[in-house]
Image: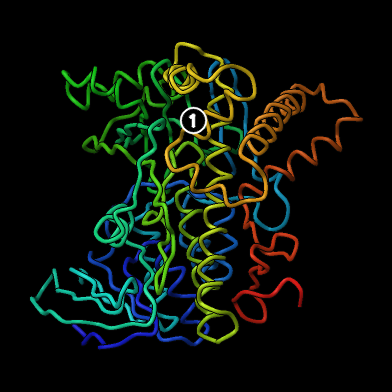
């Protein structure tokens, strides 16, 4: 093993998409970056369906050509069976050059990003675990580490800035800040496995993700380039506990049997993996940044996987982290200003997506579903109408800490919920060839609105937060809106 340095301008802990995005962008700007990853890649990870926004970041990283050439399954969009509704989401309707994405094996995708980080000047060390941090007041200043694989070396590395990209384990949030809160409404459990010989969608949509609601929850079906299909069942924790007298595999297969489309697609297939489970995966830290540190990706927050936002939030936060620190290291902006920009911007992106997921669930017509029950539980003591919608959003744990945006949550929720219903109505008309000529412009505007949920939110002066906005040329950093 190469000797670890004693010092780094920026220490990144974690080699997933958040960590590699931040590290690569900073290294490409000429900064001294060391990345420590506790595992040896490739390593398994769930979260295989990407959004088109990830391609924007891959372009900035200079790695998109490698990803495009790798052979991952191209993802043209999604096919939803939600209650009594069925519709397709086509990424080809999005604007610009990001009209598709990929379904990826995360072990292969993440290794590709990590190897690219090495090629861009990041000092990457795998099999190294950070055991503890030392602080100067509230500011982390050094990390003690140990070698986990093929050796027993230990040491200490000091740094100017820390990017915590340690995922669910949350080095800072769980061990030092103690500020992670789990959402009380989205207390869901995911059970998943891998199938071979499953049927795929036709008509050029073989790579689309299938999302299929049932009376107990919903399922995903993600076709992968190795010929397998990732299939997951998401149910409420209460429902999971009620069914736990039987085996995990039985719960899983029973859930599939209650679906419509996925049951059909899997009929000729064979389960070829063990069944895995994950729970309590929707959470947020009440702070995403502080003196000398930023929490990126899942180390800061994670959202219900309904809209496949995990890698989007990871790469987006990695971009924000790199831009914020680059401007600080170049003495273009004060550290407290950069940290405020990062936190408010990342929380705003998270808030928008959380409202989107909440509004999506609110559209479900099947009242016997656990989504409907959850909404009833959260609103039964607060009255009717718009206040119900507001409380459903506000009562999602951690929501109050994310209201550092100009729009109030009830306004955001009402806007998204109304636009979502309008979008679906227009979609149905479009697919049934009943869309009127005077509704064409409305359809275009609706597509533009929802494309913002799949894009980068802060690349213009108009989207400036605290007087700053993110720029990527001629170099990555933050710019003053009044300059």
Between 197 and 391, which is closer to the camera in this rendering? 391
Residue 75 is at least partly visible in this image? no
Residue 263 is at least partly visible in this image? yes
Residue occupied by mark 1: 211
The residue lying furthest to the front in this view is 137
Query: Split into 4 quadrants, where in the image is the C terminus?
Result: bottom right
Task: Check the image and report above or below for 43 versus 231.
Answer: below
Residue at (91% x, 30% y) in the render: 438
Judge left or right: residue 6 versus residue 456. Answer: left
Q: Position of residue 475 (x, y in %)?
A: 62, 81
Between 242 and 200, which is closer to the camera in this rendering? 242
Residue at (48% x, 16% y) in the render: 380
Q: Position of residue 332 (x, y in %)?
A: 60, 84
Judge left or right: residue 323 versus residue 174. Answer: right
Q: Position of residue 197 (x, y in %)?
A: 36, 33
The residue lying furthest to the top in this view is 368
The residue lying furthest to the right in this view is 438
The answer to which image quadrant residue 432 occupies is top right
Judge left or right: residue 423 versus residue 171. Answer: right
Q: Position of residue 393 (x, y in %)?
A: 53, 33
* Mark 1 residue crowding within 10 angstroms, few (<14) / some (14–19) / many (20+): many
Between 283 and 208, which is closer to the camera in this rendering? 283
As helix, strand or loop, the secondary structure at mark 1 comes to strand
Task: Check the image and report above or below for 167 versus 64.
Answer: above
Residue at (44% x, 64% y) in the render: 289
Residue at (46% x, 68% y) in the render: 21
The answer to which image quadrant residue 202 occupies is top right
């Amino acid at each position: 093993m190469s000797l670890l340095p004693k010092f780094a301008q920026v220490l990144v802990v974690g080699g997933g998409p958040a960590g590699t995005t931040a590290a690569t962008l900073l290294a490409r700007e000429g900064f001294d970056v060391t990345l420590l990853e506790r595992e040896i890649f490739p390593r398994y990870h769930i979260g295989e369906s990407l959004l088109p926004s990830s391609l924007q970041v891959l372009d900035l990283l200079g790695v998109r050509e490698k990803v495009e050439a790798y052979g991952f399954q191209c993802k043209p969009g999604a096919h939803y069976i939600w209650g009594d509704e069925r519709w397709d989401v086509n990424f080809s309707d999005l604007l610009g050059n990001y009209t598709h994405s990929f379904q990826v094996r995360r072990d292969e995708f993440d290794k590709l990003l990590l190897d690219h980080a090495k090629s861009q000047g990041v000092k990457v060390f795998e099999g190294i675990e950070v055991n503890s941090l030392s602080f100067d007041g509230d500011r982390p200043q050094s990390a003690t580490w140990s070698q986990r694989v093929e050796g027993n070396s230990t040491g200490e590395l000091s740094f100017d800035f820390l990017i915590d990209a340690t995922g669910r384990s949350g080095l800072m949030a769980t061990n030092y800040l103690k500020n992670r809160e789990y959402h009380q409404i989205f207390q869901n459990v995911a059970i998943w496995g891998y199938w071979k010989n499953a049927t795929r969608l036709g008509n050029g949509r073989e790579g689309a993700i299938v999302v299929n609601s049932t009376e107990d929850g919903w399922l995903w079906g993600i076709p992968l380039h190795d010929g397998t299909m990732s299939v997951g069942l998401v149910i409420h924790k209460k429902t999971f506990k009620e069914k736990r007298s039987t085996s995990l595999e039985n719960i899983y297969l029973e859930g599939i049997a209650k679906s419509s489309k996925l049951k059909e697609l899997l009929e000729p297939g064979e389960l070829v993996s063990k069944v895995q489970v994950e729970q309590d995966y929707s959470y947020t830290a009440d702070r995403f940044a502080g003196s000398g540190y930023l929490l990126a990706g899942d180390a800061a927050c994670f959202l219900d996987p309904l809209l496949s936002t995990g890698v989007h939030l990871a790469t987006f936060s990695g971009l924000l982290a790199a831009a914020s620190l680059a401007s600080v290291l170049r003495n273009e902006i004060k550290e407290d200003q950069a940290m405020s920009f990062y936190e408010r911007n990342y929380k705003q992106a998270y808030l928008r997506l959380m409202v989107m997921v909440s509004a999506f669930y609110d559209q479900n017509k099947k009242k016997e579903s656990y989504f409907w029950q959850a909404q009833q539980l959260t609103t039964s003591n607060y009255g009717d109408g718009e206040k119900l919608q507001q409380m459903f959003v506000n009562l999602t744990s951690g929501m109050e800490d994310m209201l550092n945006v100009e729009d109030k949550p009830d306004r955001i929720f009402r806007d998204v919920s109304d636009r979502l219903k309008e979008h679906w109505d227009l979609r149905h008309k479009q697919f049934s060839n009943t869309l009127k000529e005077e509704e064409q412009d409305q359809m275009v505007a609706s597509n533009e609105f929802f494309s913002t949920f799949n894009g980068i939110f802060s690349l213009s002066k108009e989207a400036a937060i605290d007087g700053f906005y993110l720029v990527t040329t001629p170099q990555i950093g933050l710019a003053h809106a009044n300059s």
